[in-house]
Image: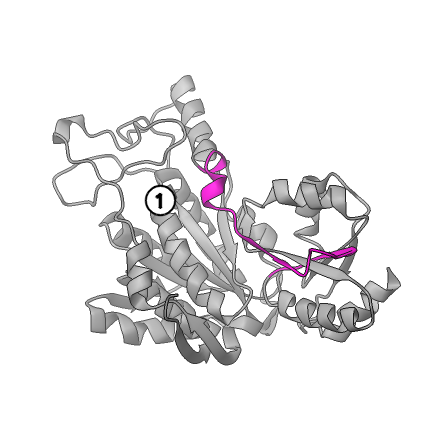
Amino acid sequence: MSKMREVVSTGNDLAAMAAVDAGCRFFGGYPITPSSEVMHTISDLLPKVGGAAIQMEDEIGGICAAIGASMSGVRSLTATSGPGISLKAENLGLAQMAEVPLVVVNVMRGGPSTGLPTRVSQGDVAQAKNPSHGDYKSITVCAGNLAECYTETVRAFNLADRFMQPVIVLLDETLGHMHGKAYLPTQDEVKAQIKPRRTFDGPPEEYKPYGVPQDEPAILNPMFKGYRYHFTGLHHDASGFPTEEIETCRKLIDRLFRKVDEHVDELESYEEFMMDDAEILMIAYGSVSLAAKEAILRLREEGIKVGLFRPITLWPSPEKRMFELGQKFEKILSVELNMGQYLEEIQRATGRKDIEKLVKVNGRPFSPQDIIDKVKEL
């Protein structure tokens, strides 16, 4: 059995530690509540391992710097909250189109607009699916406890390099500022998971970064290393040169979908808690799942058998498993700190419109009693 590290920390600090342990060597960002500690901590850690952190003039500059670093072959991170994602949206689209790997930590707070800067929310779930305009497939993971603030950030870096695109890690104000004990994999275990980004080592004149099979990501060699290609947000051919040729454009967008859709087995992650004998199904994610588990334990003391399904990869969603659960359970309750952003995906995946919901949008977390009372209404 592997030896786990025991640490006492916060979610934001753990995300920063995870990035460095996963090989991240550049951070570009701008402070914003409640994510600022990610930048604060990584700016201390990166110089010690030969990396660099830079506070840019704004959120847009932050993601631009991170994309540039990634283009040079370096694992790169930016971190923010909902309003910052709104500002980064255009360049998230560029990274999707040009297929530049990048990890984005979003510590969610109340919105829209400036909203509730110091309060908790899960209001960025729909935004994480389509943070920028156009057609592409987002990859979004969501931590549900302190340990996952670390492990899901590590996984995000590996997924970003595997699929050559941005990967969003959702934390929230509760997890980001929660201070407690976490058990983490060792640094050696984390390093063992790191696979080098794919590169082309043939003759430079034969290098076609986007000339790959329809279910595979681009192969982008580090810039300034002897291989030339065109880097653009426009529709492009195998060399990256802009084009409007009908079939080339169709195949490009089709591949941005298929490189994710045909490999969901590498992406899916979820937890099932006390599901074996459950008669009522609850679906919750992120920090809400902590209150949900406590509620389930108390409900079972009263003989009410509830189980929890917790998606960890939110996008693409674990739709096949949710469909199976939709067939199995008569009563399903969705619990979210928004107006039901993931409920729409649950409805789509299960094919059901009769799913109950419990929502809260005043910046306060759910107590276990809130959930207990709702379950008893069912």
Left/right placement of residue 82 relative to residue 343 reads left
Q: In this view, does 135 lie above or below 344?
A: above
Question: As drawn, is 147 to the left or to the right of 68?
Answer: right
Residue interval drawn in magenta: 260-285
The answer to which image quadrant residue 372 occupies is bottom right
Can residue 185 be seen here? Answer: yes
Q: Can residue 22 be seen in this view?
A: no
Q: Which residue in the structure is indicated by mark 1?
A: 162
Residue 321 in the image: state x and y as whole percent: 63, 44
Q: Residues within 10 Å of mark 1 (few under 14, many from 20)?
A: many
Query: Residue placed at 78% from the left, 70% from the top?
Result: 299
Q: Does the magenta stretch include residue 115?
A: no
Q: Quadrant of the N terminus?
A: bottom left
Say which of 351 and 309 sits in front: 309
Q: Where is residue 287 in the image (x, y as percent from the top left)?
A: 60, 68
Q: In x, y percent, where is residue 365?
A: 67, 72
- Please name the amino acid that badge 1 sits on: Arg
Q: What element carries label 1?
A: helix
Q: How is the image coloured?
A: one colour
